[in-house]
Structures are given as C-alpha cells and as structure tokens.
Amino acid sequence: MQETQYDAIVVGSGIAGGWAAKELTEKGLRVLLLERGRNIEHVKDYVNARKGTWEYPHRGRRTQEMIAHYPVLKRDYPLNETNLDYWEKDEESPYTEVKRFDWYRGYHVGGRSLMWGRQSYRFSDIDFTANVKDGIATDWPIRYADIAPWYDYVEKFAGIAGSNEGLEVLPDGQFQPAFPLNCGEEQVAAKLKSQFGGTRRIIPGRVANLTQPLPGRNQCQLRNACWLGCPYGGYFSTQSSTLPAAVATGKLTLKPWSIVTEVIYDKDAKRAKGVRVLDATNNQTVDYTSKIVFLCASSLNSTWLLMRSATDIWPAGLGSSSGELGNNLMDHHFRLGASGDLEGLEDKYYYGRRPTGFYIPRFQNIGKDKRGYLRGFGYQGSASREGWDRAVAELGVGAQFKDAMAQPGQWTIGATAFGEMLPNHANKITLDPEKKDKWGLPVLKIDCAIGENELKMRKDMTKDMAEMLEASGVKNVRTYDGGYFPGMGIHEMGTARMGTDAKNSVLNKYNQVWDAPNVFVTDGACMTSAACVNPSLTYMALTARAADFAVEALKKREL
C-alpha cells in the first residue's frame, strides 16, 4: 500500500519546486515531490548532450512534421530537433488564446530548469519600490533587505558566475569568477564607459554556469549545449543541484506522472489538507495529505490549480477573495536591439563557446535619465567573429570558397533588449468553461497584451543600443525589431501576486495564500512586478525564504 501522508507536498519540480524540496527535506520534513510529466535522470537521460550537429537526421533543425504538431512552439526558436522531447506537445496540452500568447512548457522532472537561459540577476530596491512610487498595481510586501540574505544563500549553492560592479540598480552577489569579456566586448566597454560618464556600462553577464567546481558538479566546459542537459553538472538545474541534495536526506519521495488537480481545503480548519492527484499512467485518483503545500508548478499552472480548488467556498478558487487571482499576468518584452561591425581586431580570437556574453544594466529613469514612460530595460549581447554560414547567401563553391572559409569572419557585436512589462489587472487567465484537455480537465484561457507604456519603451530599446554602438566606434550599425507577443520571453509571472493586504493580493510577504496560510506559492505566479531582469534567481531566493518560514511556523504550531 502506497504512502499517502507526508509533512510537506511540493507541486512541480522545476527551479522553484526543486529548491522547495531541498530546503524542506534538509530541515527534516518528509516531502512528496509531484511532477505531472516523466522522470529525467541526471546524465543518463541526457540522450543528445554529446551529439554533434551531423548526428541528427535533420541537422538539429525543425521539420515539416514538427511544424504541423507544434503549432505554438513553431512560433519561435524553441522548436528544433535537438531537445524536442523536453518541450510539452502543444496538441496534448492546449489552451485558449483570447489574444496571442506564446506558452512554452516543459512537463518533466526538472521542468524548464533544464532549458532555461541561466541569466541570474537580483532585483534591487528600485524594483521592489517601483509600484508604490509609480502608483501602479500594489506595493511589494518586501524590500531588498528582506531577500538579500536569501540571494546570498541561493547564489552560493547554485553557483552564479559574475562580477561585482557596485551598481544600485543591479546589486552585487556571492559570485564565482565571471566569464570574462572577450577583446571585442572589452573594446566597446571601455569606450562606452568614457562616452557616457559611467552611466551606461557593459559588464560580464551573470549566469548560473560554474567557473569553479562545486561538490558533485564540474565547471562549465564551454560547449554551448546547455539546454540539452549537462552531463558535467556545469549549469544549475534541478537534476544537477537541488534534487541530489534532497535525495541525500532520505526524506524525499519523487512521483512523476502525477497531475495535481486540486488542493484539498478544510473549511473548518481554514487550512489545506493535501492535494488530489490524477495518475497519468492509469487514470486513477489518489489523495495525499500534508501539513503544508508548496505550489511550484510554474506561474500559470499554479494559478490554474488554485482556481480549481475550494470553489465551494470561493467560486473563483482558493486565494481569490481579493479578486486578483489570475490577473496581472506579465512577461518581459524583447526581440529587438542593434548590432554592428568591429574594426582593428583582425588578429584576435577567443577560446571556447561561453554560456553568456555581456550585460548592460538598466539606465532609463535612473538618476538624471528621465523618459516618457515608466521603468526601463537592459541588454544582453556579445561580440564574436562570423562563422561559415556568412557565405551561405552567396552559395560559394570550389577553391575560392574553401579559402575564404578557412579564415575567421568579420568581428561583430550586438545586443537584445529586455524590457519591463507593467502589471495590469486586465492581463489575465481564467478557466475555459468549454474546452478540456486529454484528461478531461479545463484548459486555461489567456487574455494578455502589452500596453502603451511598453510600446513607447520599445522605440528607445533599439534607438539607445544603436546610439551606444555608434558612440563606441562600431561601424555599419543596424537596428532590428523581430516583433513580440506576450509569452515569448518565457518569463510568465504575476497571476497570484504578493501584496501588503488580503484585499490587494493573493499572497502575503512569506508567499502564503491569505485564504489558506499553509499553502505557499513561490514560482513566477507570486511576482508583484517584473523588473527588467531575468526572474529565476528571485524565485530561488523567495522559495528558500518561504521554506525557512514554513518550517519555523510548523515548529511553533502556527500552521
């Protein structure tokens, strides 16, 4: 007979769920970790991690069959032959788009921690106070000082490579040595700093790839194959980092193929009793009980689960008493920037394929820089020499072509902007009353669009980068705008936000659901604003902080 009673249940095994499992088990709790998809074991199941491009039947590219079966994934770069099995099949997990929303999901142990971009930046107090200063949405219930020790904690364990720069807008951290800028980036960085008086800076990108080994993990091998799973443990993922730590305690039970359909709520105790699980292998339903529940199923799925729960008390779901559950959906808007050619470095090259490039921290609406919109954006980019594909357009052949390809290409430099999207109550998700998935469960209806503030910002996102490149001596500067729809950033967040009061939010300052204080939500759903930096490091810190609070509250019998 299977065990059904635990101290804690964690729903979802991605970045937040892995951290929750690690922290709760290490603090002595018996934890059930539930994942709706298949198991992927570290190293053993990274079937493509050591393949060369020539070993794929279609050289890693997408096929017409893929395009037909992945109507959402085909919209952008995730659809390819190399890691197709890591992305959820669109046909099997449909959703309803009131307006276009690109939702890219990974339903397996580790979730998107296996495929993430690994850029890791702290929010600053500028970010935590922005809503209240601007009169937007609601105030964060925490400030930088509340989360700073937890940033320290997770950075040390995860292994973040970066440089301390002393910038107010981008707090320093507990970093391993940075992946250094190459000579092209250094050249532009020096000129940029002098041209703009230090207000605009190129710094090494902060990334969750190791430059020094950690226990059980080797340093990054500079292969640029991160989203295939790393057999060396060179980047942070659930499989390489948090899951082994949780397993080592002997207190973790991992159950893949477990679709959580409801948080079971006890209206007399005003607490959750556990969760209801649909076994994806046999369609049987099992109830599991626990003292606390951590929802870490990714932003939209955690909120979907809340909407499915306690509807006999709150028709819109558990955590809906404020009217904010499902609202305030955010992403980061991007796919635009500028690039150009570098001169004077023809005798220079670089070693390996770094997992990161450079970062230009936000400088808009900071200090004396005032814009006609709120918030701002940063840039991620790199300098490199063009490869063999530079000649594809000409379709050269013969000796002349071979000789040309034996020489390094032109030095180029470019960057893509990532901008903040304001929280907006009108950007929302709801349960579709008509459409069901293959399990007979209601799908999400997503209604989200960028607003006037983002559209104004986008004009500067190309203009400013071009201005910086030209001021730094870069030649043939050209801008681009590839277009954007919400979801493309794969940074969906905000549908069960934290707040200062049960009337303005779903969660309190410790990520507890106001309506059920033994339920915690620590993934992207909890975000009150988006800032303009990659959010995953903040999910890690908030999860570790919430787990610490939960265990202490259990000890005091407050939960």
Image (tube, helix red, strand yellow):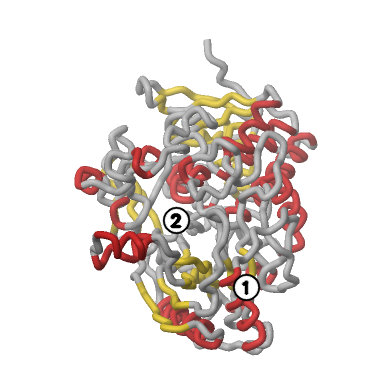
The front one of 406 and 199 is: 406
Name the residue located 49 percent from the left edge and 24 percent from the top edge: 287
- Give the label, 2 or 1, closer to the camera: 1
Q: Relative to residue 215, is residue 103 depicted above or below?
A: below
Task: Residue type at mark 1: give it.
Answer: Glu
Q: Position of residue 202 (x, y in %)?
A: 61, 73
Residue under pointer 2: 490
- Residue 329's label in the rendered image is none
Name the residue tied to disc 1: 186
Residue 34 position (above or below residue 87): above
Dividing the image into 4 quarters, which one contains the C terminus?
Answer: top right
Residue 146 shows in the view: yes
Q: Nearer the viewer, residue 124 or 479?
A: 479
| Residue at 53% over, 49% down | 319
Residue located 54% across and 40% down the image: 230
- Tell me the CA gap for discs 2 and 1: 30 Å
Other residues around mark 1 within 10 Å, as few (<14) / some (14–19) / many (≥20): some
Number of numbered markers: 2
From this viewpoint, is residue 381 visible?
no
